[in-house]
Image (cartoon, helix red, strand yellow):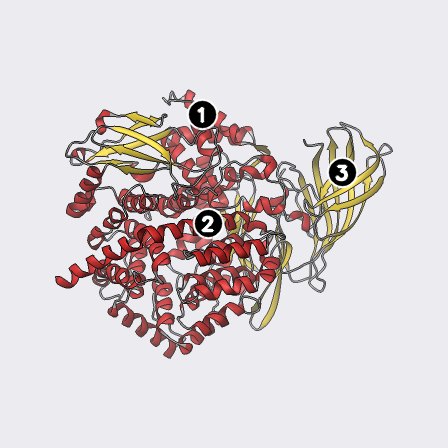
Amino acid sequence: MMLLLPIFESLSGVNSRFVSVCPSGRSVVQFECLEATDLILIHSNKLNYTQTADGGSSAPEIRSTWLQLKTQYLVIELNGKLTAGQKYQLHAAFTGELADDLAGFYRSEYEEDGVRKIVATSQMHPTHARKTFPCFDEPAMKAVFHMTLIHPPGTVALSNGEIFVTEHLKFEPTKKMSTYLLAIIVSDFTHLNATQGLTQIRIWARRKAIEAGQGNYALNVTGPILDFFQSYYNISYPLTKSDQIALPDFYFGAMENWGLVTYRETNLLYDPDTSSNRNKETTVTIIAHELAHMWFGNLVTLRWWNEVWLNEGFASYVSYLGADYAEPDWNLKDLIVLDDVHKVFAVDALTSSHPLTSKEDSIVLPEQIMEQFDTISYSKGAAVLRMLSDFLSEPVFKQGLSSYLRDFSYSNTVGSDLWIHLEKAVKDNNVSLPRRVDAIMNPWVLQMGFPVVTVDTSTGKVSQKHFLLDPESNVTVSPYRYEWTVPVHWMKDADVHEHICFIKFFTTLSQAVNLDMRSGSSWVLANINVTGYYRVNYDLGNWERLFAQLSSDHQVIPLINRAQLVDDAFNLARAQLVSTTLALRTTLYLSQETEYMPWQSALNNLQYYDLMLDRTEVYQPMQDYIRKQVTPLFLHFKNLTSNWSHVPEDHTDQYNQVNAVLTACRTGLTECQNLSRTWFRQWMETPSHNPIHPNLRSAVYCSAVAAGGPAEWDFGWSQFKNASVASEASKLLTALACSADTELLRRYLSYTLNSSMIRKQDATSVITAVAANRAGQNLSWDFLRVQWEFLFTDYGVGSFSFASLISGVTARFSTPAELQQLLDFVEEHEATGFGSATLAVDQALERTEANIKWVQQNKLEVLDWFSSQISELQQD
C-alpha cells in the first residue's frame, strides 16, 4: 500500500563537471502523507547523502536512517508520525559517482580528432534513478520534476524539458512522470533539427557523425512516425520537443525517456555509404518503438513491473505499424511473424517460461525487475496484442486504446483496465465475440505458453492442447488448465482460384467440430498470415496435400503461411507430434523459392540442427544438402543483380540476397567463397575503398575471416578500431568471431575484459558471437567459467544483455557431459545467484536436457535423411 504520494521533486545544483567523477547536488521531495506513519521509505543506491525533513512546525524530526541493501530502500525513522493529508518536504544533499557502469548517471567516452571526450549521460530505467539522487523510484509514484544543472562551459546540457533559465541551466518542469523516464545528458554533441507541427525534433550525436549526415535518416522519419501515432492514438504528442540522442556507450538498444530518447549509435545513426538495408530498418523500427512509448508507457504507465508487457509488448507491436507508415513499400508489418512470433514461440514452449503478467509480490528486487524485460514481455506481448487487434478489427482496437489512454493520462494502470476499455469499444461497435474481452485474454496473459491447434480434415475436428517442446515435462498448475479461446482463420485450396475464404471461429473447448474443414481431396490451411498466437498441426493426409501444393505451385499458399508451415513442422517434430522426416520435407521445395520469409524460417530452424549436430557425422551431409538447396537461390540473385553489380530493389529481396550469399559461402559453395575472398582481398589491398556492398558486408566479412588467417583477422580488427560508423564497427565486431583459428578467438575473448579494446556494451555480444562459432564454443564456455566473477560483477545485476550471454554460450549444449558442467556451474555460484540471468539459467538447463533427448532420438533419422538426399543428387 502506498503511504506517501510524491507531488514534485526539485533537483538543483546537480554538478556534472568532468574534472570530478563525483556529481553532487541537492534535492527536495514534496509529498503528501496518505496514512499516518513514522517511516519514510525512499530509494537510494551508491549515494552519499544528508537529509532533513520539513513540514512546518508539525513535522517530526529524523531519529535515524539505514539502508536496506537488497531492496535499496533508504529507511528514515522519525521521532513522531506524519499526519494523513498533510504535505511535507524531504531535503537531501547527495554525492554520487560518474562511473562507467552504464547505469544511473554515468560516463561514456569516445575519441574525436585525436581528443578524448566524455559524455555524462543517464540510464534511469528501470531502477537506476536512485543511483543518481534519492527518490521514490517506483513507476506508480509519479511526480513533476524541476531540474537545475551546472555543467562545464562549451558543453551542451539536455534533459526532459526545454531550457527554462540559461544561468545554471534550469529546465522547465516536466509533466507528471515516473522516475525511470528522467534523463540528464552533458556532452560536446551537436544536432540536426526540424519542426513537425508544434513539435521541435532534434537528432543529437557526435559532431563527426552529424557532419557526415548520419542523423539525416532519423530526422526524416521521426516526424512522420510522430504524426502516425498521434492519429493512431487520437491524442496529440504530449510534449513540445522530441530530442533523440546517439550514445557511444549504452546497454539497451534504446530508452524512451520522455522528450529525450537515448539510443545506441547503431540504432539511431544511418550512413548511406556504409550502413546496410538491415541497419536502416533497425533505425526506423526502433525509433517507432521508442516514440510509441511517448503515449503507451510514458503518458500512461504500468503500476508495477510485474506487467512490463503492457509497456514493451505494446510498443513492440505498434513499432511495426509506425515504421510501416514511414516506409510503406517495405511490408514491415509482415516481419513481426519472423522477428517476434516465431522467436518467442521457442521460449514460451519451455516449462521455465512465465506468464505475461507475473504476481506483483514476486517481483520485488532490482534483479527480479530487470529479469522481466525479456522475450516474453516484448515479443509475446506484441504477438498477443496483434492477435487481439486482428479479431476485434483495428478500428475497434484503436478506439479502445484511445479511450484507455485518455482516461489514465499521467497516471498508472493494470492490465484489466485495458480490457475494460476494449470491451466498451466492442459493445459500442456491436462486435460479436464468444466471450468478454477479459475472459478471452486472461488465459493468454495470466498463464504461460500457447496451444497447438490440430485440424483433422477427415472429420472436421479441431482440438487444442498446451504446446511443449518436451512433451514429458511437468508444468505448474494453471487455473485456466492451459486452455485458450483461440481465433482460427482458415482457407481451403478449392477456394483459392475464386476467392480466399477466411472463416473465423473461436474454439473455446479443448475439442470442437467444424464440418466445413472436412476437406476430401482439398488441403486446409489454418492461422492465415499467422495472426493467431498458436501453432497448427494436421492429419497426415492434409500434410501430404500441402506438400504436393508446395511442390507444384508454392505461390498458391500465402507467403507468410509458407514460412509458418516450415516453422510449425520443425517445432512439431521437436515436440514429437510429427516425424522429423516430415519436418525436413518442408525444405524440399526451397530450391524453387525466392522469397525471404520462407527461406529465413527454414534457416532459423536448420540452425538448430546445425547447433545440435555440427560436432557429429551428420554435419557434412547436412551442409551438402543445404548447399544443394541454396545454389538456385544464389544463382537467382547473381542474375537479378547482373553478376552482383547492384542490389535488388525490393526490401525483403535484399534480405534474401544476404541469406543466399551467407548460406552458400557457409555451406561451401566454391563460387561464393571465391567471390567473398576476392572482395575482401581487394579491400585489404586498398583499405580506403571497400568494394563490398553494405548489405553483403556481414556475410562477406564472416566468410573471409573464417577462410583466412591472422592477416585477415588483424585487418578486420584494424578496420574495427578505425571505424567511424557504428553499424560498420558492429559488422566487423561480429565477423571477427567467425575465425577458425582458436588462438585468435582466445585473444578476442580476452579483449572483452578490457573496455579500451571492447566497449562494455559490446562485450557480451562478442562472447556469444564466439560461442556461435563451432570452433569457439568450448573456448567461450571455458572463458565464461573462468571469468565468471568478473563478468557477473561488471555485467550481471543491471545488464540487459547478461541473460543473452548465458543463453548464447549454452545454445549448443546437447551432451550429458555439457549438462553436468552446467549443473556444476550453477551449484558453484548458487550462493551469489545469477542476478538478471536467473531465469536464463533455468531455461538453459531445460533446453540442454531437451537437446540431449532430441539428439538421442533423432540423430540417426536425420543422418539417413540428409544422406539419402545427397545420394539422390549424386545419382542424378
Q: CA distance from mark 3 to mark 1?
A: 40 Å
Q: Position of residue 838 (x, y in %)?
A: 55, 49
Question: In what quadrant of the picture does the C terminus appear?
Answer: bottom left
Q: Position of residue 674 (x, y in %)?
A: 28, 72
Q: CA distance from mark 3 to mark 2?
A: 39 Å
From the viewer's perspective, tell me whether residue 755 is left or right of residue 267: right
| Secondary structure state at the residue bearing disc 2 | helix
Earlier residue among tags 2 and 1: 2
- Label 1, on which residue? 439
Q: In this rendered view, identify the residue nearer to me: 577 or 284.
A: 577
Q: Which numbered circle lies on residue 286?
A: 2
From the viewer's perspective, tell me whether residue 199 is left or right of residue 870: right
Name the amino acid, label 2.
Answer: Ile
Q: Position of residue 18 (x, y in %)?
A: 68, 63
Q: In the figure, 856 relative to 414: above or below? A: below
Q: Which numbered circle lies on residue 40?
A: 3
From the viewer's perspective, tell me whether residue 704 is left or right of residue 80: left
Task: Tell me the mark number nearer the camera, choosing from 2 and 1.
Answer: 1
Instruction: Look at 82% across and 31% down and name the residue there.
Output: 81
Please tell me how crowded label 1 is: few (under 14), some (14-19), or many (20+) other residues with Cα within 10 Å. Answer: few
| Secondary structure state at the residue bearing disc 3 | strand
**Quarter of the figure with residue 518:** top left
Please tell me how crowded label 2 is: few (under 14), some (14-19), or many (20+) other residues with Cα within 10 Å. Answer: many
